[in-house]
Image (cartoon, grey):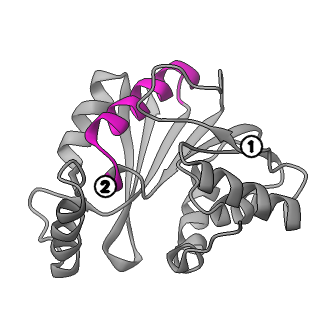
Amino acid sequence: MKQTAPAAARNRDPIAAVLAEELPGSGTVLEVASGTGEHALFFSSRFPQLAWQPSDPDPDAIASVAAWRAESGPPNLLAPVMLDAASGHWPVAAAAALVCINMVHISPWAATQGLFAGAARILPSSAPLILYGPYLEEGVETAPSNLAFDESLKARNRAWGLRAVAAMDALGHDNGFTRSRRVAMPANNLVLVYRRV
């Protein structure tokens, strides 16, 4: 049942360093698209003062998160819940922060639209929506590896692909969010932090 993603072990420490500066001191963090659950396990251990709520729309991912939690999850790692970001009905009514890692480019644009709409429903004023992954930026040369990755994603599913930061900012604005931070990360990824106005 437990799944592993090699990238999770590589990027968890750099992501945690940014989370340490952006997450609130208490409350529940909703992680959308938790995947294997390795990030949820690591971040819940790293931030014991926060309740970490993993979620995913894939039953296999939910099973993997549950298996990691059963084996070595800390008390603040909550049981995973089924959550489709594109849905207008989420099983989580409120959170102090929302984290979403490597979902935006491997899902239809409707999922990202739903992510911001859902974040607007459940986050209080000034709370962070923290995104991690590869993006396209105007005026910034895209790494050849990211261009190749974008092509491979679109070959698998035409609705997938790297999104432009400008499009993310516009979507955030439409849902009452302003981007407060952009952090360059290893392997040509970015962390984008949006906060409720």
User: Is residue 23 rendered to the left or right of residue 187?
Assistant: right
Residue 56 is situated, as x and y percent measured from the top left of the image, at 57, 45
Task: Read off the residue under disc 2.
Answer: 105
Please name the predominant secondary structure of the magenta segment in the image. Answer: helix
Whether 81 is drawn above or below 87: the answer is: below
Residue type, mark 2 in image: His
Point out the image quarter for the C terminus: top left
Residue 176 is situated, as x and y percent measured from the top left of the image, at 37, 22
Task: Read off the residue under disc 1.
Answer: 25
Sort mark 2 into few (<14), some (14-19) or many (20+) by Cα contacts within 10 Å: many
| Front disc: 2 or 1 | 2
Q: Quadrant of residue 86?
A: top left
Residue type, mark 1 in image: Gly
User: Is residue 76 rendered to the left or right of residue 6?
Assistant: right
Please, what secondary structure does the residue beneath circle 1 have? loop
Nearer to the camera, 157 or 183: 157
